[in-house]
Image (cartoon, helix red, strand yellow):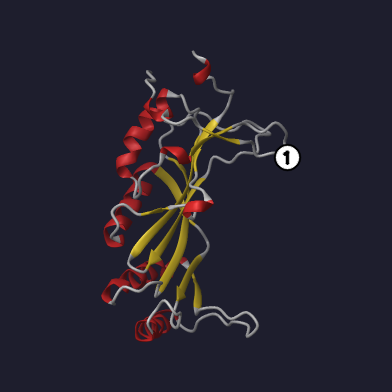
Amino acid sequence: MSADRDTEAGEWVVYHPPKSVAFGHQSRPRDPRLALPIAEKFLNEWAQYLLGDRIELTCHELADRTSSPVGLARLAEARQRFGPELPTSPRYPTFPRWELDKTQLQSAIQFALDDDKFPKQKDGPTTLRLAYYFTWKLSDWIREFPPAGDGRDSTSHVGLTIGGQRLFVQPFIVFPLPWDSPMLHAMLARLEPTIPFRFRDQYFARWLRPRSPSSYGRHLKLKPGWKRLDISI
């Protein structure tokens, strides 16, 4: 193996878009009504997953980037569906906001998707935020797990923001395999057509094992073109 293929024992790969792109991607396809079923299918086929506890809905009823008639119509419907919004402090005013429980999720998703029944706004008028946490379902793909004392967590998560006639996806995806693993490259080839966004090679990184119990390990950039190397099984 050449020096370009050297890896450290126990290293993993992580996919995490940076802050410069708001930690995520516009969905593929762009229509959220088409992209959401793809996200659901991905989770059902590939993952053992749980819905996160925080489900937050916001209505931007009077922002300077949302017209008053549209914002007020959405606010009225949100109050009808989900009850009064959370109280706010006069010192720290916010847009009308609800923290929903899991039984309200499907209604909230439909409400957010219904932004497309109104003229498109510069912002909002609806923002629904939720997240899923998952581990890989297929143990024949993923065989390496952290040993005792390894502070890394193999759990991945994906945040979804729905509203404004778009779906924004914020993935943090852990692959407990080294970057030059033939199994990883085979997995990515199968995985990429099933996800609701497009992977960018530059957002993958090596995740090295921690050197002390209090550390979570280091992330190192992968070299350009790393996915195109000829790595045979």
Q: Identify the element where label 1 is drawn.
A: loop
Apparent side of residue 163 relative to residue 133 in the rendered image (left or right): left
Residue 33: image quadrant is bottom left
Q: Is residue 57 above or below residue 43?
A: below
Residue 114 seen in the current view: no
Where residue 35 appears, as percent x and y from the top left, is: 30, 56
Where residue 163 appears, as percent x and y from the top left, is: 38, 68
Q: Is residue 61 above or below residue 193?
A: below
Q: Is residue 19 above or below residue 66?
A: above
Residue 145: image quadrant is top right
Where residue 210 appears, as percent x and y from the top left, is: 66, 33
- Residue located 41% across and 26% down the image: 183
Q: Residue furthest top?
A: 1
Where residue 123 appears, as percent x and y from the top left, is: 41, 72
- Residue located 36% across and 28% down the image: 186
Q: Tell which of 2 and 149 is nearer to you.
A: 2
Q: Residues within 10 Å of mark 1 (few under 14, many from 20)?
A: few
- Residue located 32% across and 35% down the image: 190
Task: Read off the residue under disc 1.
Answer: 214
Q: How many marks?
A: 1
